[in-house]
Amino acid sequence: MATDERTILGWREWVSLPDFGVRTIKAKLDTGARTSSLHAFKLKRYTRDDVPMARFEVHPVQRSDAASVEVEAEVVDEREVRTSSGHVETRPVVVTTLQVGDARWEVEVTLTRRDEMGFRLLLGRQALRGRVLVDPQRSYQVGRKRSEVVRRSPRSATPPRTSKNSPRSSKTSPRSQEEE
């Protein structure tokens, strides 16, 4: 029998989104959700050099709007997502680096208002699959809260393109997915 080398995490963890300048944000690891979502407000969509973009702000501290980080990122897709209340909404999708403890990997997150939700970041199965195991009886298995917030306005998470015709993602069609 092979040994599973994946990290065991709790149902909630302190994580970082270094591409976005977010040094710490509390995330809910939700294996019942397919996609991940990030609380984004002041969301503005636009096109730069034929590339769909989004500029938005993130409140990394739960239940507080005192600190915010402005982010600019390429929109790689749009997804239809069924919310926890059963409504379907179309959301922009961006790619960023997720850091959990010392491990880092790219994840897709949808952008939406999560004011009424308990966590500013929800990590779904697609972000966790093959990398971690979630123990619902545990919390905060890696890392501790870091109160510092990196302030950069705006923080660009999109590296410069070498060609206008080389898409960062081949995903272009909306898909229906359950999230929360």
Image: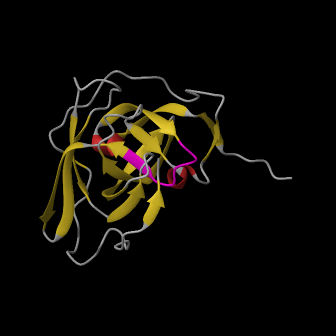
Region in magenta: 30-37
Is 115 situated above or below 64? below
Q: Position of residue 43 (x, y in %)?
A: 19, 48
Camera-nearest residue between 156 and 102: 156
Tell me: 1 left or right of 102.
right
Q: Main secondary structure of the magenta part?
A: loop
Please tell me whether residue 160 belongs to the stretch shown in magenta: no
Residue lying at 35% horizontally and 26% vertically, measured from the top left:
62
Q: Where is residue 163 in the image (x, y as percent from the top left)?
A: 22, 74
Q: Position of residue 86 (x, y in %)?
A: 43, 51
Residue lying at 20% horizontally and 32% vertically, measured from the top left:
151
Tell me: 139 left or right of 57.
right
Camera-nearest residue between 125 and 144: 125
Q: Residue furthest right?
A: 1
Camera-nearest residue between 162 and 127: 127
Tell me: 109 left or right of 156.
right
Count of all numbered marks drawn on residues in the image: 0
Q: Position of residue 149 (x, y in %)?
A: 28, 27
Is 159 situated above or below 13? below
Tell me: 61 left or right of 7.
left
Residue lying at 41% horizontally and 33% vertically, measured from the top left:
119
Residue lying at 79% horizontally and 48% vertically, measured from the top left:
3
Is 51 situated above or below 85? below
Q: Residue furthest front?
A: 86
